[in-house]
Every structure is written in structure tokens, then in C-alpha cells.
Amino acid sequence: MANNRSRHHYIPKFYLSYWKPRGKNFVYLHDIHTGNITKNSPNKLFVIHDYYEKSSFFEPYEVEKLFSKSESQVSHL
């Protein structure tokens, strides 16, 4: 399946986008262990590669397709 994405967000990108400063394309991250504060793009955060490919309960990528559809419906709320 050529169009399957291999980077699956376990926290949806649209939700992370609510934490971006207005007009910016990053979120701030606070490391509770070191106290460091960094910034990063929501596209790069909370990602597991080929997460649904590893599931034995579902066809690969079927869960991702379902999440993608539902997330696109609620992301504008």
C-alpha cells in the first residue's frame, strides 16, 4: 500500500496545534526531569513509526484511516 503513512501520532496533531502560540508553528515542551524548555513542531511530536503495522488485531493502517477520518471531522471544533 503505497499511500500508507508510517508516522502515527498517539496524540493527534490537531490537538497539539491548540498549544501553539498564535501565528507560530511550534509548541513549547517542558522536560520535568531536567527543567529544560524547548520548542518543536507538532508534526514531530508524539510519533510512533508503523504503530498500526505492528497490531495483530486489525488490518494494518485501518485504525489509522479511521482515526484520520474522525480527527478531520472534529479538528475544526
Image: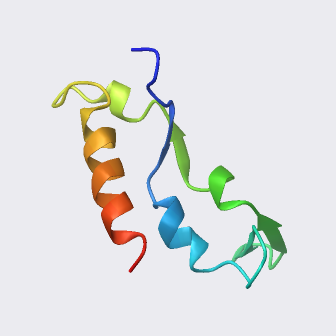
What kind of colouring is applied to the model shown?
Answer: rainbow
Quadrant location of residue 55?
top left
User: Residue sitting at 31 percent across and 64 percent down?
Assistant: 73
User: Residue sitting at 25 percent across and 33 percent down?
Assistant: 62
Residue sticking out furthest to the top: 1
Q: In the drawing, does residue 23 fall left or right of residue 65? A: right
User: Quick one: 27 or 55, which is closer to the camera?
Assistant: 27
Against 41, is 49 above or below?
Answer: above
Residue sticking out furthest to the bottom: 22
Q: In which quarter of the image is the N terminus?
A: top left
Q: In the drawing, does residue 74 fall left or right of residue 33? A: left
Quadrant location of residue 33?
bottom right
Residue sticking out furthest to the left: 57
Quadrant location of residue 40?
bottom right
Q: In the drawing, does residue 24 fall left or right of residue 68? A: right
* Label tally: 0
Against 13, is 32 above or below?
Answer: below
User: Quick one: 12 or 37, which is closer to the camera?
Assistant: 12
Image location of residue 11, percent across then percent down: 46, 61
Q: In which quarter of the image is the C terminus?
A: bottom left
Image location of residue 25, percent across then percent down: 75, 67
User: Residue sitting at 51 percent across and 30 percent down?
Assistant: 6
User: Residue sitting at 67 percent across and 51 percent down?
Assistant: 44
Image location of residue 74, percent across then percent down: 33, 70
Q: In the drawing, does residue 20 fall left or right of residue 24? A: left
Image location of residue 12, percent across then percent down: 46, 60
